[in-house]
Amino acid sequence: MMNAQTYSFYNKFAFLYPLIDVVLQPQKKVLFSEVNMLPEGFLLEIGIGNGAHFQFYKKHKITGIDTSAAMIKQARKKNYDNVTVLKMDGEALLFDDGAFDYVVLSHVIAVVDNPDQLLAEVFRVLKPQGQVFILNHFTPNNWLGKIDRAFEKISTLLHFKSFFHIHNIAAITKFTLLKEVNFGLVPYFKLLIYQKK
Ligand SMILES: C[S@@+](CC[C@H](N)C(=O)[O-])C[C@H]1O[C@@H](n2cnc3c(N)ncnc32)[C@H](O)[C@@H]1O
């Protein structure tokens, strides 16, 4: 579950999203090129924000969810035939087991309260051999790790986890890593593509 403060934070700052998106655009290009190469299927995006990604999905039947009412309102304004927008918690998905071929988690795994529960739900709703695309910052084992640690308290106020290691999430062992794409000279932002075992 997303706590009430995080929920109201994302409601309040929904208007900032187009700005932040400009900064993250290069990584997202890679995400979409990977996703668009796959055979047509059912794709769930969790934490869609304002729905800025919808225009970049060139195939697939898309379901987009978010817990923030303000984000959902903006996402619904983008009216695409292949996209269904629902207000739902990624940690408590209301879909059947094996409903999706692909799941996209773009800058959401370090925002939810319980990333382990989120991944367990992703595992459940994926078909066998289904793939999850995780775009995020991942704390490296170098000086950047110390900065992430130092910012841990402040990042909590901003409703995300600055210090974030994927191997600390137990449910990740249910997946096989297919591909890792690093962005920038110092690998901090990454796209990790996993397959359900
Ligand atoms: C940092 S934004 C990322 C938005 C977009 N995915 C992107 O890459 O630009 C995180 C989004 O996840 C949503 N969110 C947070 N916790 C969630 C949860 N448990 N289930 C679904 N959405 C959640 C927030 O409301 C917010 O819109």
Image: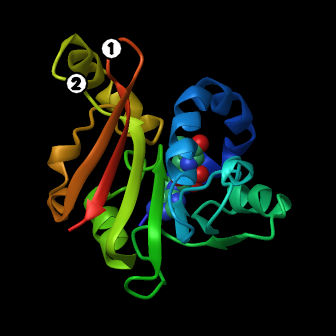
Residue sitting at x 30%, y 30%:
152
Residue 19 in the image: above or below residue 47: above
Q: CA distance from mark 2 to mark 1?
A: 9 Å
The amino acid type found where label 1 is placed reads Val
Give the residue number, with chain letter if any, for mark 2.
140
**Is residue 100 placed above or below 16 in the rendered structure?**
below
In which quadrant of the rendered view does residue 189 lie? Answer: top left
Q: Disc 2, disc 1: CB below 8 Å?
A: yes
| 26 to the left or right of 192 | right
The outermost residue toward the bottom is 96
Q: Disc number at residue 90?
A: none
Q: Residues within 10 Å of mark 1 (few under 14, many from 20)?
A: few
Q: Residue at x 57, y 45 (%)?
A: 32
Return the residue nearer the eye: 178 or 6. 178
The residue shown at (45%, 42%) is 159
Q: From what the image shows, is residue 19 above or below residue 53?
A: above
Residue 170 x, y percent position in the rendering: 15, 58
Other-residue count near label 2 (Cα within 10 Å), few / some / many at <14 / 14–19 / ≥20: some
**Residue type, mark 2 in image:** Pro
Say which of 140 and 98 sits in front. 98
**For this rendering, which residue is in front, 176 or 75?**
176
Quick one: quadrant of the C terminus?
A: bottom left
Secondary element at tag 2? loop
Towards the viewer: 50 or 9: 50
| Residue designated by label 1 | 186
Q: Is disc 1 placed on a helix, strand or loop?
A: loop
